[in-house]
Image (spheres, grey):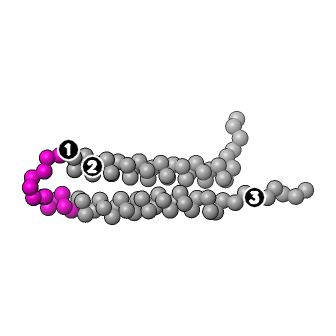
């Protein structure tokens, strides 16, 4: 049997999974926006539904990027190496 994970190892894996998920959503949204701008033929005037989609995507991407950067920046601040117990 494998040994059990410590709390630090569990936290590190959890942060990795959350970071990867946020990054995939962020990159997918950016790719969707670029594809829509570059390869989809648009009429001269933008449709009302397209304007609403763009107005929703912009704050969503800002919050995703802020959450991702905050999570990555604050990750190392709380983890301090524990002193080994004195015998």
- The answer to which image quadrant residue 52 occupies is bottom left
Disc 3 + disc 2, Cβ < 8 Å? no
Q: Main structural element of the magenta stretch: helix, strand or loop?
A: loop
Is residue 87 rendered to the left or right of residue 26?
right
Taking the spot 55% from the left edge, 53% from the top edge, the residue there is 15
Instruction: Check residue 59 for magenta coloring.
Output: no
Q: How many angstroms separate mark 3 from mark 1 (CA)? A: 54 Å
Residue annotated with mark 2: 34
Residue annotated with mark 1: 39
Disc 1 + disc 2, Cβ < 8 Å? no
In terms of depth relative to the viewer, which is nearer, 56 or 6? 56
Taking the spot 42% from the left edge, 59% from the top edge, the residue there is 65
Secondary structure under tag 3 reads loop
Q: Residues within 10 Å of mark 2 (few under 14, many from 20)?
A: few
Residue 40's spot in the image, x, y percent? 17, 46
Taking the spot 51% from the left edge, 49% from the top edge, the residue there is 17
User: Which residues are drawn in magenta?
Assistant: 39-52
- The answer to which image quadrant residue 39 occupies is top left
Nearer-N-terminus badge (1/2): 2
What label sits on residue 82 in the rendered view? 3
Front label number (3 vs 2): 2
Q: How many angstroms separate mark 3 from mark 2 (CA)? A: 46 Å
Q: Residue pushed farthest right? A: 87
Front label number (3 vs 1): 1
Residue 71's spot in the image, x, y percent? 52, 59
Q: Residue pushed farthest top? A: 1
Taking the spot 37% from the left edge, 49% from the top edge, the residue there is 27
Q: How many angstroms separate mark 1 from mark 2 (CA)? A: 8 Å
Q: Residues within 10 Å of mark 3 (few under 14, many from 20)?
A: few
């Amino acid at each position: 049997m494998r040994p059990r994970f410590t709390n630090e190892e569990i936290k590190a894996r959890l942060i990795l999974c959350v970071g990867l998920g946020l990054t995939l959503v962020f990159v997918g949204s950016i790719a969707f926006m670029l594809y829509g701008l570059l390869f989809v033929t648009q009429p001269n005037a933008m449709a009302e539904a397209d304007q609403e989609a763009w107005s929703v995507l912009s704050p969503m991407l800002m919050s995703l990027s802020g959450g991702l950067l905050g999570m990555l920046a604050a990750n190392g601040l709380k983890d301090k190496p524990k002193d080994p117990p004195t015998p």
